Image (cartoon, grey):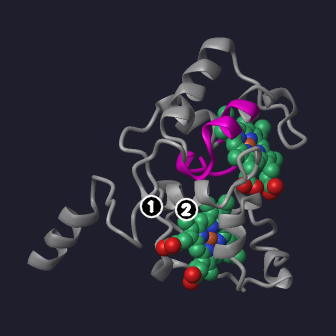
Amino acid sequence: MKRTLFVIAMFGAAPVWADGNENLASAVANPHWKTECSACHIAYPPSLLPERSWRKLMSGLVKHFGQDASLDGPTAQEITAFLVNNSADRAPNKRAKKVMGSLGPNEVPLRITETAWFVRKHDEISASVWQRPKVGSPANCAACHAGAERGDYAEHRVRIPH
Ligand code: HEC
Ligand code: HEC
């Protein structure tokens, strides 16, 4: 009982910024971002792309990876501000710094999965694994990171589906 309470106290509410297992959930989540940007996939952590990428992505929602993800002006502005404030340029976590370090100064990736950081972190995964029906796409984070929706990408909780 004591142990359970201890675990809840440690991992229950606040993001843990410790090295290695740091949670990628932003300190204060934005409700519109949560609902609008998790309608078709998980709400990707803002800290895995730079400000310039989020601005470009948010200004092209009408043609968003082959889908129309457009929003009304005020909602789009609010979500953009949230993404920018928690982007890789600004987020106080080490992974964000590694993402920035992996990008060239003029690179504006629209995908997390295209950043050199992501590719390096996932280089042990073979092409056939990405193509498994339960994975389907590198963008399907939750296939292997069950806690992705909560910003939990801890290495020891990764499970690759068969
Ligand atoms: C209508 C459905 C839809 C909505 C709503 C939507 N997306 Fe997407 N998004 C997609 C599709 C489809 C892809 C491509 C997924 C793939 O390649 O497997 C994608 C991919 C992405 C990627 C790239 C993932 C990668 O490969 O790293 C990002 C980043 C992204 N979306 C952000 C957002 C944000 C931010 C919002 C909210 C403003 C949003 N999406 C809302 C459909 C949607
Ligand atoms: C096919 C399974 C799979 C998918 C899909 C996947 N990952 Fe991973 N991911 C892994 C594995 C395996 C590792 C552990 C690599 C290692 O041991 O160093 C990892 C590592 C990570 C790490 C580093 C964890 C750490 O502690 O340093 C992050 C962050 C991460 N992934 C984010 C993502 C995001 C974001 C997505 C979706 C855009 C994604 N992953 C999609 C399998 C996957």
Residue at (75%, 73%) from the top-left corner? 134
Whether residue 1 is visible, yes or no, is no
Q: Which of the 4 quarters of the picture holds residue 70?
A: top right
Residue at (80%, 85%) from the top-left corner? 126
Placement of 136 over or under 70, stated as above or below? below
Q: Quadrant of ligand 1?
A: top right
Taking depth in this image into account, of 101 and 87 the one nearest to the observer is: 101
The crowd level at tag 1 (other Cα within 10 Å; few <14, some 14-19, many 20+) is some
Residue behind mark 1: 94
Question: From the image, which quarter does the N terminus lie in?
Answer: bottom left
Count of picture labels: 2
Place of residue 95 in the rendered image (x, y in percent of width and height, measured from the top left): 50, 61
Q: What segment carries the magenta color?
A: 39-56
Residue at (76%, 44%) from the top-left corner? 106
Residue type at numbered disc 2: Lys
Residue behind mark 2: 98
Place of residue 68 in the rendered image (x, y in percent of width and height, measured from the top left): 84, 31
Q: Which of the 4 quarters of the picture holds residue 54?
A: top right
Question: From the image, which quarter does the C terminus lie in?
Answer: bottom right
Q: Which of the 4 quarters of the picture holds residue 87?
A: top right
